[in-house]
Image (cartoon, helix red, strand yellow):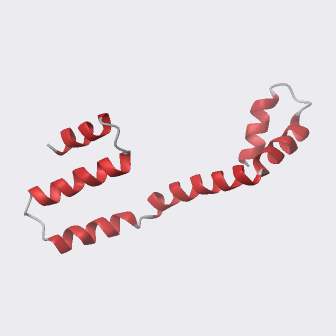
Amino acid sequence: MMLLVFLALLLAGVPLAFSLMASGLLFFVMHDSLPVLVAVQRMVSSSQSFPLLAVPFFILAGHIMNASGITSRLISFANLLVCWISGGLAHVTIVLSA
């Protein structure tokens, strides 16, 4: 049931985060096996895991770097370092990742 609600919301154009939230809330409303406080505690504790927090902050760092213009300067610098090697774009990518 929850999967159908999730897929229907996605097909309706609802953003992924809100679709997940709505299907999760529907699960807690329909099943009385968990007390409400336990459900809230599990939701809060799962949102505080390091990998889940690292992904949005990594994306935020990329947006900040792109808005400040440092990414184009980094690409130019890396291209300057490895432009004499054939397959320069691959080398630029490796230099920027290091």
Q: Position of residue 44 (x, y in %)?
A: 33, 69
Which residue is painted at 64% across and 57% down in the image? 61
Residue 68 higher or lower than 48, as above or below:
above
Q: Is residue 82 left or right of residue 47?
A: right
Q: Which residue lies most toward the left here?
A: 32
Which residue is painted at 76% across and 47% down in the image? 71
Q: Is residue 95 left or right of residue 61?
A: right
State how many labels appear: 0
Q: Position of residue 91 (x, y in %)?
A: 78, 35
Q: Which residue lies most toward the bottom here?
A: 37
Q: Quadrant of residue 94?
A: top right
Q: Nearer the viewer, residue 24 or 38?
A: 24
Q: Position of residue 55 (x, y in %)?
A: 51, 54
Q: Quadrant of residue 64?
A: bottom right
Q: Position of residue 32 (x, y in %)?
A: 7, 63
Which residue is painted at 34% across and 43% down in the image? 14
Q: Is residue 81 left or right of residue 57?
A: right
Residue 84 higher or lower than 69, as above or below:
above
Which residue is painted at 25% across and 52% down in the image? 22
Q: Name the image quarter holding the N terminus.
A: top left
